[in-house]
Image (tube, helix red, strand yellow):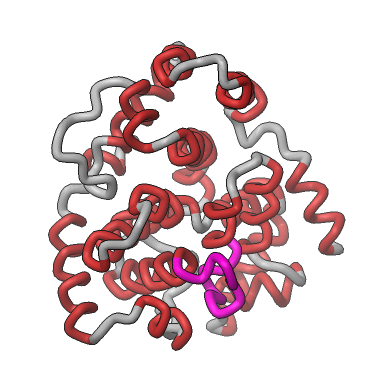
Amino acid sequence: MEKQAAKKKVQLIKNLPTLPGMLEKVSRMVESRHHSAEDVGRMISQDQVLSAKLLRMANSAFFGFAREVSSVGQALVLLGFDVVKGLILSSSVFDMIQEKVAGLWEHSLGSALAARSIADYLKLEEPEELSLSGLIHDLGKVVISAKMPADYDEIAALVDSRGLSMFEAEQEVLGFTHADVGQWLGESWRLPEKLILPIRFHHQPDRAKDGLPSASVVHLANILVRGRGYGFGGDKWVPALDPTAWSTLAMTVDDLGQIVDSFEEKLLTLGDVSAA
């Protein structure tokens, strides 16, 4: 499929659910600036299933609040609208994952937790956004699977027959990758650039420019989860660590060991979220 045609198709997707209904209403409320977090929270809470999933994620290990987040309004205050919006989107899209891409939900949760472990250890700013970036970095794979199933099957066949990574096979079959598709989707859904850049460049953090720190975190988080074997990202390979990401995060080997230990401890707590 020609790249611009594929981009248009992705940007026209309206049934990667929630956005046209609930999230569109919520976005308008926030942009009007005449509504409080409690007003927006009440709107989201009208969807009981969605609000339950949102609270389950907000109380999970990859946000790590000392006290329970008991309402959607409180989640908005603590996390900010951009993070809550991302959680709503991911909840909607990931509803399709169990049927479409086995193991990707777990891989995504693990990446969120790994990103949080990196952010906490390195005392990085906006750790909640980094956690969310880990959670949604592979949204493009869901879109390719759901909306381009024949292409997805060809990609998976190349991964099996030639031992390619998903990223390499996507480039060969499509001429673009799940990172591109995730970027297009994020732009279509009006996610902020600070969340889109890690999606676009988690395989190529050296190209992220202003988004280099966040892309480096998600790049490393993806590697840690794949190395741990938690979930399934679509192929068996653990990517090489990009030197630019390593230097950007300014870590030592000892730091990495501490992060891995923290990640392993927190990974044990994910059971309640994986059922979301």
| Viewer-nearest residue: 59 or 37 | 37
Q: Quadrant of the N terminus?
A: bottom right
Decide whether the magenta segment is chiefly helix, strand or loop: helix
173 above or below 265?
below
**Residue 103 visible in image:** no
Residue at (74%, 47%) from the top-left corner? 10
Residue at (57%, 67%) from the top-left corner? 210
**Residue 80 visible in image:** yes
Start-end of magenta stretch: 200-213
Residue 33 image position (x, y, % from top left): 57, 21
Using the rendered view, name the quadrant where residue 190 is placed: top right
Residue 275 image position (x, y, % from top left): 30, 38
222 left or right of 33?
Answer: left
Residue 96 image position (x, y, % from top left): 52, 40
Residue at (44%, 79%) from the top-left corner? 245
238 left or right of 57?
Answer: right
* Residue placed furthest toward the front: 33
121 left or right of 171?
Answer: left
| Viewer-nearest residue: 251 or 45 | 251
| Viewer-nearest residue: 164 or 115 | 115
Q: Quadrant of the C terminus?
A: top left
Residue 143 image position (x, y, % from top left): 63, 49
